[in-house]
Amino acid sequence: MRRLLITNARLINEGTIRDADVLIKGERIEKIGGGIAAPDNAEVLDAAGLYLLPGMIDDQVHFREPGLTEKGDIATESAAAVAGGVTSFMDMPNVSPQTTTREALADKYRAAHGRARANYAFYLGATNRNIDEIRALCIDEACGIKVFMGASTGDMLVDDSDALEKIFADAPVIVVTHCEHSPTIRDNEARAKAEFGENVPMSEHPTIRSAAACLASSSTAVDLARRHGARLHVLHLTTALEMGLFSRARRHDKNITAEVCVHHLWFDESRYDELGARIKCNPSIKTAKDREALIAAVNDGRIDIIATDHAPHTAAEKNRTYFKAPAGLPLVQHALQTLFDLAKDGQISLETIVDRTSHAVADIFGIVDRGFVREGYFADLVLVDANRPYTVELSNLLYKVHWSPFEGHTFSSTIDTTLVNGNIAFRRGQLATEIAGQRLHFNRGR
């Protein structure tokens, strides 16, 4: 069985940073320690000067397959993911056909087998009418149930109050929500159209997709979860107002958890004039004060997970006017680098980055044997060079849509190497030929 020894690394894991060697046997970590002797025939990877951390588990991506593959697919976007240190992803159901039946869910798993460079799982999407499919779901069949409590890309809005009550009462696994109040948004759109016509400035997006719209919906989700005793994970929070809904308690002690995405930690509304629709996303990027409140909530434990909501659209689509340009942006290739830059600026610690991108995701979703650097766990690992700058250019983008909101930006760190299930998936700017991604497994239900 193949063995790989990583030596001289600075390991970030479970709240500490220390020097360590890691010996990998096959797919799993065999030994962690200092001065590990290389077994016969073992490959040795000298990680001197590099940080070693568990790979990012991205609990929210849109890889666009099936049906929307002009924007991305499992093969292309998982390649970008491993280049960014993302070793596992959970993909959303607003594709074509929508993943709202267990049969469609099984089809996606079959499509990913042998093509995903990172480990994978898929959500079952909720609708106003598929409660029987939700009730029949088994714990290891999906990573969770996605409920669009606000209209976004794709027509999957769940706005029937009786359907929502049943979903939260009967969901056998964690419920994850997109929270925006659609009636408020429609009123704001009408006011913007009356003022600007079809030429609404992109800078109006946080006014249209407002903080009030977010709070109204997320408050409803939290109330439903509390009344029904459901496990709830609220996705891509964007406002200071919403932070009062969430607890600083240890994640093992709470049923309601929260997520923020890297672009909401990085950008604020001052960037719309420069980037326009390239940073149009739902929920919207809002004020600098909102961004600061989100970072504070990451640091004090109210926000449990950092993800990407990777959602590519073609450049041609993004060049349309406000109402025609779709919401979403490609992010998986540069998520960890944005966080390392925030750490360099003193806004977040490296230990917190690892906790929120790996440990917390594994704990909250009940992912089996991943998310930590532990003996016996799968060797999903990333080496980061925090002293080697990296400039985002068209020539090094792996997204199928081939653009990024970070084009021209120089990050302070570089993703040196990514391992998936003990296999080198990406190293020094090159993808490996072997495709090593596996289906994720879960052991936690309601």
Image: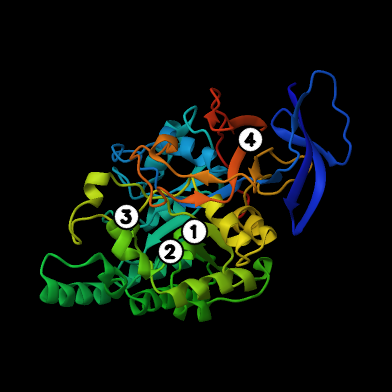
Q: Are marks 4 and 1 in contact (CB under 8 Å)?
A: no
Q: CA separation, marks 3 and 2?
A: 11 Å
The span from disc 4 to disc 2 (Cα, nearest Å) is 29 Å
Instruction: Tell me: 336 left or right of 97.
Output: right
Q: Which of the two residues, 10 or 221, is positioned nearer the viewer here? A: 10
Q: Quadrant of the C terminus?
A: bottom right
Task: Name the residue beneath numbered marker 2.
Answer: 267
- Disc nearer the start of the sequence (4/3): 3
Where residue 316 appears, x then y in whole percent?
Answer: 22, 45
Residue 433 lies, in percent from the top left, at 53, 22
Are discs 3 and 2 less than 8 Å apart at CB?
A: no
Q: Is residue 171 above or below residue 290?
A: above
Neighbour tally class for label 1: few under 14, some 14-19, many 20 plus, Cα within 10 Å:
many
**Residue 294 point in image, percent of width and height:** 52, 71
**Kind of residue indicated by mark 3:** Arg
Give the number of the mark in front: 4 or 2.
2
Q: CA distance from mark 1 to mark 3?
A: 15 Å
Disc nearer the start of the sequence (4/2): 2
Q: Which residue is mark 3?
A: 278
Q: Amino acid at mark 2?
A: Phe
Residue 426, image x, y percentages = 57, 32
In front: label 1 or label 3: 3
Query: Residue tagged by mark 1?
Result: 262
